[in-house]
Image (cartoon, rainbow, N blue to C red):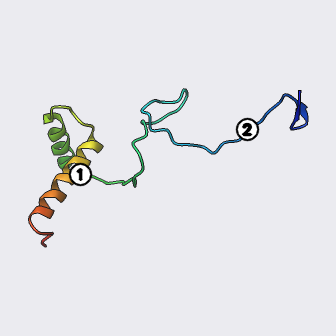
């Protein structure tokens, strides 16, 4: 056998850490599944607004999470704004 790394038959390979977007969780990993690249945003929402947000999410056929509901509502607002010709105020 050839000598590799000073030992016979012993091969060490180092690889860069990779992000996997397969929707599968690694054993022992914590937190939500990876959703891709994006900027995390921390938003404080008052109880009446949060209740309205939760109510909106519960009325949706697929029952999105609160963060997903926020993303969808933001997209709707931005789409309406773009269609009306821009932001006013």
Name the one closer to the observer, 45 or 77. 77
- Residue 18: which quarter of the image? top right
Q: Label 1 vs label 2: CA separation?
A: 52 Å
Q: Residue furthest left?
A: 84
Name the one closer to the observer, 12 or 53. 12
Q: Earlier in the sequence, mark 1 or mark 2?
A: 2
Q: Position of residue 64 (x, y in %)?
A: 24, 36
Q: Is residue 87 left or right of residue 42?
A: left
Mark 1 — residue? 46
Q: Position of residue 55 (x, y in %)?
A: 15, 39
Q: Secondary structure at mark 2?
A: loop
Q: Is residue 35 left or right of residue 69?
A: right
Mark 2 — residue? 13
Residue at 27%, 43% in the rendered image: 68
Residue at 66%, 42% in the rendered image: 15
Q: Secondary structure at mark 1?
A: loop
Q: Quadrant of the C terminus?
A: bottom left
Residue at 84%, 28% in the rendered image: 9
Q: Position of residue 52 (x, y in %)?
A: 15, 44
Q: Position of residue 29 (x, y in %)?
A: 53, 32
Q: Quadrant of the N terminus?
A: top right
Label 2: few (<14), some or many (≥20) within 10 Å? few
Q: Residue furthest bottom?
A: 89
In the rendering, which numbered label is found on residue 78? none
- Residue 13: which quarter of the image? top right
């Amino acid at each position: 056998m050839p000598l590799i790394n000073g030992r016979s038959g012993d091969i060490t390979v180092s690889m860069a850490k990779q992000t996997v977007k397969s929707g599968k969780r690694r054993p022992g990993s914590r937190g939500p599944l990876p959703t891709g690249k994006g900027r995390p945003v921390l938003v404080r929402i008052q109880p009446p607004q949060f209740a309205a947000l939760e109510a909106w999410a519960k009325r949706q056929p697929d029952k999105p999470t609160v963060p997903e509901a926020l993303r969808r509502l933001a997209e709707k607002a931005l789409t309406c704004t773009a269609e009306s010709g821009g932001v006013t105020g």
